[in-house]
Image: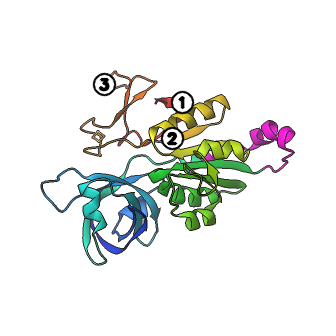
Amino acid sequence: MKVREYASVIEQKEIAAGIFSLWLQTEQIAGEAVPGQFVSVYSGDASRMLPRPISICEAEPDGRLRLVYRVAGHGTEEFSRLRAGETLEILGPLGNGYPVHDILEIPAERNLAQFSGKSGNDDPAKRVLLLGGGIGIPPMLQLARALQAGDGTKVQIVAGYRDELFLTEGLAAAGKLSIATEDGSAGTKGNVLDAVREQGIAADVICACGPKPMLRAVKAYAEENDIPCWLSLEERMACGVGVCLACVCQSKEVDGHSHVHNKRVCKDGPVFRSTEVEL
Ligand code: FES
């Protein structure tokens, strides 16, 4: 259930140029959040009424909530000036999140059938591949932790950066981490799929979050290789709760209510099966 509350700032740090990590103490939101959900963050300036959607990076049972975001305008610039002890109005958790249970239920057998001949790999563990690009990397941290708890599951993360790295320590503790950078300053030069191909990373299931061109490429890759795949879409949002239709994306199926090929990213998503959406 979503709630609107004033959260207090525990700590804020700039962890890379223009990328901020904000730890908040919440009453209820952190306790209810599942990986892949987001919160709407309200500006203290009444002239900027629209909240900004920010994905959840970590949520702890004791109410601590971590948001990692990029400063991309006046709203996020205002948030970046918040200091410990100040408060911030947030609404959440919003959206559907990744279906962790369904992902853990996907059988590992296809892994053996598909890859043992090629790679000589006889490890029956299921391989979950998490692909995060840019500001789509932070939600992969909570997702990796949740999946790592599944028996017989191996979590491999590929994080794609423009240049400067962030969150690598936490990600490396939550799964096997590979890095891609556009400028080649660390890891594979190129994008997340370049790293997957270069390193021969196989997967039974893929979860991805990042900019649309990356998700389009991941969707094609997953469908070509017949790998079940969930994508978290980054869309511009306004209301954040399914009312204004500012965030619609094209879906394969006709929506039962509106009779159009649309889904609301904020309410029906942001996480979709790759086969469900057109990108
Ligand atoms: Fe308003 Fe999604 S942001 S419907």
N-terminal-most mark, 1 or 2: 2
Please indicate whether residue 62 sits to the left or right of residue 240 in the image: right
Residue at the spot 29% in from the left edge and 75% down from the top edge: 83
N-terminal-most mark, 3 or 2: 2
- Answer yes or no: is residue 131 visible: yes
Above or below, comparing residue 239 to residue 173 in the picture = above
Label 2 sits on residue: 231
Of the two numbered discs 3 and 1 in the rendering, the one whose residue sits closer to the viewer: 1
Tag of residue 106: none
N-terminal-most mark, 3 or 1: 3
Q: Which amino acid does label 1 sit on?
A: Thr
Above or below, comparing residue 252 to residue 218 in the picture = above
Residue at the spot 24% in from the left edge and 37% down from the top edge: 244
Nearer-the-camera pick, 105 or 78: 78
> Circle 3 sits in a helix, a strand or a loop, which is it?
loop
Label 1 sits on residue: 275
Q: Which amino acid does label 2 sit on?
A: Leu
Q: How crowded is mark 3: few (under 14 residues within 10 Å), some or many (20 or more)?
A: few
Q: How crowded is mark 2: few (under 14 residues within 10 Å), some or many (20 or more)?
A: many
Q: Residue 181: x percent and y percent?
A: 57, 52
Please indicate whether residue 276 sits to the left or right of residue 25 in the image: right
